[in-house]
Image (cartoon, grey):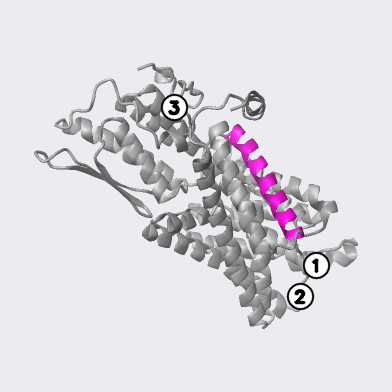
């Protein structure tokens, strides 16, 4: 890496570039001081349990099945279990270690229980993997560190995450061309959605119905603000309000992981994840469609205004800034660390700039979305090397401003207005854009991994101990 790029990385992310997990997992592992005794059932079980627990955190955070499998095999081989078979499915992990012809294989499994999205936990595990690779932690030390990571509370209060979701809504509204009043309405509407779904989640309501409620709440302000636009003397585009709510509700679904699994050869996990995405999206569609239908029955007709992201070159700087704020806000809502917020903002800005330039070049929305996602995925891979931020954080946050909220709204409006052909066409377009975004991210990450192989040998990595337990944070074993 050149000297100027090292200085730029230091200014943006706080420390010099170090080898990333996406590179070190593909390299020969540094074995412990003593090879593992394959006849020692306790030692083998300890290593297998460590590997499967690491995999559980990665899978729960939305990491693809193949990448999770690679990291599990890396952990196992680091401690001497070279002959391992790993099977990762939607919510379970199986790992078997072969111990030769004279001894039976050792097997363990773990079922992954879904938790709230927490990118800080993903980043902490990423640091732990690099520490295993470069400092040869013992399995007992790694277990204690992993215990701390899994049991640690969120890095900042829940209201800050709620502020992130609301900031995402306001940024998307500005991105769609809304003025300050509509941006404030989107902000406050998202506060209501967030608090309501938190209460419903505590009551144990299935997520599908939470999405239905979210879709209803996101749509209710549209007819109200449209009716008040005359007395208030403002211009209101209902499509901006509804599309903003849809984007917020779509954010965080495992779209990238499901398409990545389908592309990289994990069809079972891909099918399960894709079904989950489809069902959650169907919940949003149900809530929005119900509200639009009720509004129509009450006489509150909403005009079908063709709001679009393409608003000319004069608004492009504002839209790029809004894309950066939207990506950073989503990362904040997902409890990302400070350096990840910076990386997500850069990814969102780069993706939005690419999308707008491509669309203005008459390339089409679908091609523009795919091109922008490729750049976001590529940037995520580079940031993983430069700033040690997991690529998934940048990828998911970077494509959030590009989610097809407008296409879904147009499709639903067409169905409610009995223009079924137009409605189905727009919903199909939304699906195509979603797949293009996810596939582009996967291709971009692959390009980043293969473009520049790391040079061997690596210099020792000095890993930050800020998020590791103090008693053993500076262990040199």
In the rendered image, residue 5, in percent from the top left (x then y), is placed at 64, 28
Q: Is residue 42 left or right of residue 264?
A: left
Say if the magenta span includes residue 354.
yes
Earlier-in-chain disc, 3 versus 1: 1
Residue range corresponding to the magenta coloring: 333-360
The N terminus - image quarter:
top right
Outermost bottom residue: 418
Secondary structure mostly seen in magenta is: helix
Q: Which mark is residue 226?
A: 1
Q: Residue at x 70, y 45 (%)?
A: 349
Q: Is residue 70 left or right of residue 155?
A: left
Q: Residue at x 49, y 20 (%)?
A: 462
- The image quarter containing residue 240 is bottom right
For the residues labelled 3 and 2, the Cα–Cα distance comes to 67 Å
Q: Residues within 10 Å of mark 3 (few under 14, many from 20)?
A: few
The residue labelled by disc 3 is: 456
Task: Determine the secondary structure under disc 1.
Answer: helix
For the residues labelled 1 and 2, the Cα–Cα distance comes to 9 Å
Task: Using the image as rendered, state which of residue 24 and residue 310 is in the foreground.
Answer: 24
Task: Determine the secondary structure under disc 2.
Answer: loop
Earlier-in-chain disc, 1 versus 2: 1
Earlier-in-chain disc, 3 versus 2: 2
The residue labelled by disc 2 is: 300
In the rendered image, residue 280, in percent from the top left (x then y), is placed at 52, 62
Please name which of the two marks, 3 or 1, marks the residue nearer to the observer. 3
In the rendered image, residue 168, in percent from the top left (x then y), is placed at 67, 49
| Residue 192 visible in the current orientation | no
Callout 1–callout 2 Cβ contact below 8 Å: yes
The relative height of residue 44 versus residue 475 in the rendered view (above or below) is below
């Amino acid at each position: 890496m050149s000297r100027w790029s090292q200085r730029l990385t230091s200014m943006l992310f706080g420390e010099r570039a170090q080898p990333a997990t996406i590179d070190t997992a593909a390299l020969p592992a540094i074995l412990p001081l003593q090879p593992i005794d394959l006849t020692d059932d306790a030692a083998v079980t300890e290593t297998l349990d460590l590997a499967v627990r690491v995999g559980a955190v990665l899978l729960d955070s939305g990491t693809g099945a193949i990448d999770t499998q690679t990291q599990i095999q890396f952990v196992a081989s680091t401690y001497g279990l070279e002959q391992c078979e790993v099977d990762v499915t939607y919510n379970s992990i199986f790992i078997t270690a072969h111990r030769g012809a004279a001894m039976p294989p050792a097997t363990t499994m773990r079922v992954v229980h879904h938790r709230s999205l927490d990118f800080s936990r993903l980043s902490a595990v990423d640091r732990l993997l690099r520490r295993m690779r470069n400092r040869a932690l013992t399995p007992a030390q790694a277990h204690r560190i992993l215990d701390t990571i899994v049991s640690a509370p969120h890095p900042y209060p829940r209201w800050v995450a709620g502020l992130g979701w609301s900031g995402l809504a306001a940024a998307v509204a500005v991105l769609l061309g809304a003025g300050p009043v509509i941006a404030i309405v989107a902000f406050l509407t998202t506060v209501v959605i967030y608090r309501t779904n938190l209460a419903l989640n505590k009551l144990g309501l299935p997520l599908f119905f939470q999405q239905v409620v979210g879709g209803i709440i996101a749509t209710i302000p549209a007819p109200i603000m449209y009716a008040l636009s005359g007395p208030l003397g403002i211009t209101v585009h209902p499509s901006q309000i509804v599309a903003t709510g849809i984007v917020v509700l779509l954010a965080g679904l495992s779209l990238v992981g499901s398409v990545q699994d389908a592309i990289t050869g994990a069809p079972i996990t891909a099918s399960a994840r894709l079904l989950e995405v489809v069902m959650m999206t169907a919940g949003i569609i149900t809530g929005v469609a119900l509200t639009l239908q009720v509004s129509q029955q009450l006489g509150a007709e909403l005009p079908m205004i063709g709001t679009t992201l393409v608003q000319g070159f004069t608004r492009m700087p504002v839209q790029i800034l809004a894309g950066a704020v939207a990506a950073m806000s989503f990362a904040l809502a997902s409890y990302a660390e400070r350096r990840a917020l910076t990386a997500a903002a850069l990814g969102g800005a780069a993706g939005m700039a690419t999308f707008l330039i491509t669309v203005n070049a008459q390339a089409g929305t679908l091609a523009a979305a795919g091109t922008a996602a490729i750049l976001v995925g590529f940037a995520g891979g580079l940031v993983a090397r430069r700033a040690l931020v997991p690529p998934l954080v940048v990828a998911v946050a970077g494509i959030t401003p590009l989610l097809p909220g407008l296409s879904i709204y147009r499709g639903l409006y067409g169905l409610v207005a009995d223009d079924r052909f137009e409605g189905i066409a727009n919903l199909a377009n939304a699906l195509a854009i979603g797949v293009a975004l996810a596939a582009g991210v996967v291709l971009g990450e692959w390009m980043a991994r293969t473009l520049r192989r790391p040079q061997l040998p690596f210099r020792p990595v000095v890993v930050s101990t800020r998020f590791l337990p103090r008693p053993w944070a500076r262990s040199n074993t």
